[in-house]
Image: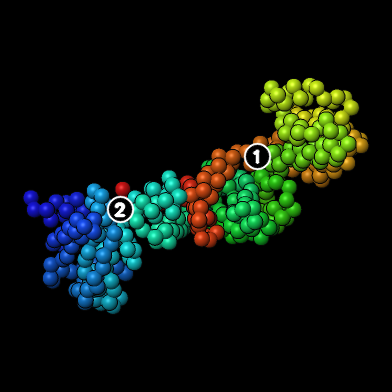
Amino acid sequence: MKDTNLLQLALGLTSPWTVTGAGFDAEAHRLDIHIDFPAGSRFPCPQCGAANCPVHDTDRMSWRHLNFFQHQAYLNARVPRIRCNTCGVRKVTVPWARPDSGFTLLFEALVMTMICAMPVAAVARMVGEHDTRLWRVLHHYVEEALARLDASEVTRVAIDETAARRGHDYISLFVDLDRARVLFVTEGKDAGTVAAFANDLAAHSGDPDTIAEVCIDMSPAFIKGTAENLPNAAVTFDKFHAVKIVNDAVDQVRRAEQKGQALLKGTRYIWLRNPDKLSDRQQVTLDALPTRHLKTARAYQIRLAFQDLYTQSSAEAGAGFLRKWSFWATHSRLPPIIDAARTVKHHWDGILRWFDSRIANGLIEGINSLVQAAKAKARGYRSSRNLKAMVYLIAGKLDLGLPA
Ligand SMILES: [Zn+2]
């Protein structure tokens, strides 16, 4: 077997394409494979599909291919432009690469697989390409997959924001709760993000009017955005967020009290935890405190009681429980706790909605960790466009349609 035949087989080339030669440069660690077609070959029109179009002229191109052992490999060919009776002169699409890509499909598939597992910059170093070229490949596959995304069956959505970089910029995530996938990512955390989501949904066979349940934190922007753009959605306020509001109030009580109570120094994390999560040392510290006389300890008890809301058996039981809790909290004479109770009262229905919807952003905790991974993998990303593409890639459950 001639080495060109082997390469022909390995590349899976079909008529009229044949391997005509190969050049190996050991010093440059480079293999060049030359591909050509016989004179007089005819090609289908890439535009309309008309068969047997004659070649008008050719254009020399080369593509980075999968490595040949430790050596970089390139395919080189003259790509014909054909003359179609209907479409005029058109460049043929070669079977091993996308139009205008400098990589073969298999090389792109390898790169995409690697990008799913490690930062783009690391992939770029490993394959010896500039990362902007790899980002271009990633954007292509993500955009193609998003164009095929079908949102027609989406009815329950969680919305969450996350810091894009160093806590300054934010992106908002819209998650399909039933399929545990990110549907939509956009910059910002204002009401406009929900409007953008509704538009995106409509563009993917979804219908904003059929969204029945939405889980959000208590940010006025998401409340307003949901009311205006997802008109039939019942709002559930994320329970972790609700507990956090009361927890933050405990911390404020502790900070104020600590000014006159040296005993409270170094106890911050005790009050932020649940009793069963305390370390032995924290337990000893807690036991030694005169908790009976501490405002912080009272605030802590009120917070622990608030969590019990979520162990109630029904929405009715929950409402009764919350009424009693609110009475206790508003009569606690602890201003931060009274404020938290007011916030709870203000978001009453959405807090109790949990008993019927049972949705929480904790359901998307797995997604959140994927997003953190996306941020890590997009480290050194040059734009929020790159971060968004990475979130879609990692958390969007996209069908990338990569060649096998
Ligand atoms: Zn044509």
Label 2, residues with CA under 10 Å away: few <14, some 14-19, many ≥20: some
Residue corresponding to mark 1: 360
Name the disc covering residue 190, or none: none
Query: In the rendered view, would you say 259 is above or below 187?
Result: above
Question: Where is residue 2 drawn, in percent x and y?
Answer: 8, 53
On the question of residue 402 being in view, the answer is no
Q: Name the residue rendered at 76%, 25% in the picture.
A: 285
Residue type, numbered disc 2: Leu
In the image, 104 versus 352, the foreground residue is: 104
Confirm if mark 1 falls within 8 A of ligand 1: no
Q: Is residue 287 left or right of residue 65?
A: right
Q: Name the residue rendered at 39%, 51% in the picture.
A: 123
Residue corresponding to mark 2: 106
In the image, 81 versus 3, the foreground residue is: 3
Label 1, residues with CA under 10 Å away: few <14, some 14-19, many ≥20: many
The secondary element bearing badge 1 is classed as loop
Question: Where is residue 57 drawn, in percent x and y?
Answer: 21, 76
Q: Quadrant of residue 202?
A: bottom right
In the image, 136 versus 99, the foreground residue is: 136
Q: Are marks 1 and 2 in contact (CB under 8 Å)?
A: no
Q: Is residue 312 left or right of residue 52?
A: right
Earlier-in-chain disc, 1 versus 2: 2
Query: In the rendered view, would you say 268 is above or below 80?
Result: above
The secondary element bearing badge 2 is classed as helix
Question: Where is residue 159 drawn, in percent x and y?
Answer: 63, 49
Q: Is residue 52 left or right of residue 181?
A: left
